[in-house]
């Protein structure tokens, strides 16, 4: 039996502890926002937040989240109101195909937890390990900066 907090709710499931977290989120909880990209922890499409840290879920055994807080892109929306990052990605057209977007948003969320008012260079450094093949990087940077301001971290 594995217990953890998922998007603000305590969950408990009988699971093989070696199951990979991304597949547990998608197959056991129906949370399909987290995407499977490279499967090697490199592209960032599978990024979730675990205890306020962005983590690649494609190689993490579910046993590693026992007793921890897991946040997925679905958990950012509250009472049908988009999180400022989700809204900024829409407002600034910071996506094309949308495949990398959940991982980008979750990585940006992790960045803004640690640094609520990052400079452009800090955003670039914080986001550089999430890959976007569509080339929306400039708009992604603008969206993260805008969200920072909307979250009152920026000026």
Image (spheres, rainbow, N blue to C red):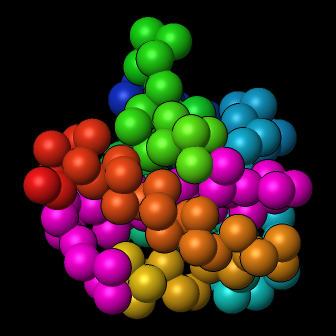
Question: In the picture shown, does residue 84 fall above or below 20?
Answer: above
Q: Position of residue 122 (x, y in %)?
A: 30, 84
Horizontal side of 20 relative to 151 (left or right) equals right
Question: In the picture shown, does residue 107 fall above or below 83?
Answer: below
Q: Is residue 14 visible?
A: no
Q: Is residue 145 visible?
A: yes
* Magenta stretch: includes residue 101: yes
Horizontal side of 2 relative to 9 (left or right) equals right
Question: In the picture shown, does residue 39 fall above or below 117?
Answer: below
* Magenta stretch: includes residue 34: no
Q: At 57% across and 86% down in the image, what residue appears?
A: 129
* Residue 62 lies in quadrant: bottom right
Q: Position of residue 19 (x, y in %)?
A: 73, 61
Q: Position of residue 138 (x, y in %)?
A: 58, 73
* Residue 50 lies in quadrant: bottom left
Q: At 87% across and 56% down in the image, what residue appears?
A: 97
Q: At 68% across and 87% down in the image, what residue appears?
A: 42
Magenta highlight range? 93-122
Q: Which of 119/25 is in front?
A: 119
Q: Which of 72/153 is in front?
A: 153
Quadrant, the N terminus: top right
Quadrant, the C terminus: bottom left
Q: Which of 125/43 is in front?
A: 125
Q: At 72% across and 55% down in the image, what residue appears?
A: 95
Q: Position of residue 45 (x, y in %)?
A: 71, 67
């Amino acid at each position: 039996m594995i217990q953890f907090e998922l998007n603000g709710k305590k969950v408990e499931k009988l699971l093989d502890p070696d199951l990979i977290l991304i597949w547990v989120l998608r197959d056991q909880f129906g949370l399909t926002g987290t995407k499977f990209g490279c499967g090697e922890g490199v592209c960032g499409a599978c990024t979730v937040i675990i205890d306020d840290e962005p983590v690649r879920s494609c190689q993490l055994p579910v046993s590693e989240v026992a007793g921890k807080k897991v946040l997925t892109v679905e958990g950012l929306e509250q009472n049908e109101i988009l999180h400022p990052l989700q809204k900024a990605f829409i407002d600034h057209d910071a996506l094309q195909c949308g495949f990398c977007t959940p991982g980008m948003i979750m990585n940006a969320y992790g960045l803004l937890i640690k640094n609520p008012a990052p400079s452009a260079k800090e955003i670039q450094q914080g986001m550089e390990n999430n890959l976007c093949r569509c080339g929306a990087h400039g708009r992604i940077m603008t969206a993260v900066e805008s969200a920072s301001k909307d979250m009152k971290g920026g000026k």
